[in-house]
Image: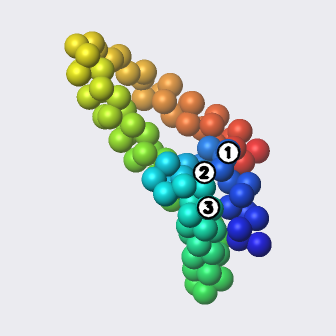
Amino acid sequence: AFMMAAKGVWRCQNSYGEFYRKMKARHGPQKALTATAHKIARTVYSMLKNGTAYEMKRMKERETRSQEKRVVFLQKEVAKVGGTMELPSEAKINELAEARLAAAHG
């Protein structure tokens, strides 16, 4: 069941989809699928063991950190070619992130 869940996550715009795509780039599709299924299984096991619900807050925090890392990477790449990069306002970033989460889970 976890393998089936992992197969469906590759095009999702959430932390599991991002994990799958990162693992696929590093190790290939089969290992990425297995690693993602294992990650989902660990999450489910933890939820069952502790009697807790899945925390969307953690996923949002992970996505925020990931986005911050992407911005830093892109700024460095733009600086290499001698350009500058203008960032959108914090309100616009939050609006886009909420719309992305709503579309992914909605």
Q: Mark 1 touching mark 2, by CB under 8 A? A: yes
Distance Cα–Cα, label 1 vs label 2: 6 Å
Residue type marked 3: Gln
Distance Cα–Cα, label 2 vs label 3: 14 Å
Mark earlier in primary sequence (2, 3):
2
Q: Is residue 53 visible?
A: yes
Labels 2, 3: front one = 3
Q: Which residue is mark 3?
A: 30
Q: Which residue is mark 2?
A: 17
| Residue 31 pos. (x, y %) | 56, 64
Q: Name the secondary structure under disc 3.
A: helix
Along the line of sight, which residue is nearer the eye, 74 or 97?
74
Residue shown at 71% from the left, 71% from the top: 2
Q: Quadrant of the C terminus?
A: top right
Q: Relative to 12, is 82 above or below?
A: above
Return the mark for residue 23. Answer: none
Distance Cα–Cα, label 3 vs label 1: 16 Å
Residue shown at 61% from the left, 68% from the top: 34
Q: Which residue is mark 1?
A: 11
| Residue 93 pos. (x, y %) | 48, 30
Residue shown at 54% from the left, 55% from the top: 28
Circle 3 packing at 10 Å, graded few (<14), some (14-19), many (20+), is: few
Residue type marked 1: Arg
| Residue 42 pos. (x, y %) | 57, 76
Q: Name the secondary structure under disc 1.
A: loop
Circle 1 packing at 10 Å, graded few (<14), some (14-19), many (20+), is: few
| Residue 71 pos. (x, y %) | 36, 32
Labels 3, 1: front one = 3
Q: Name the secondary structure under disc 2.
A: helix
Residue type marked 2: Gly
The answer to whether 27 appears left or right of 82 in the picture is right
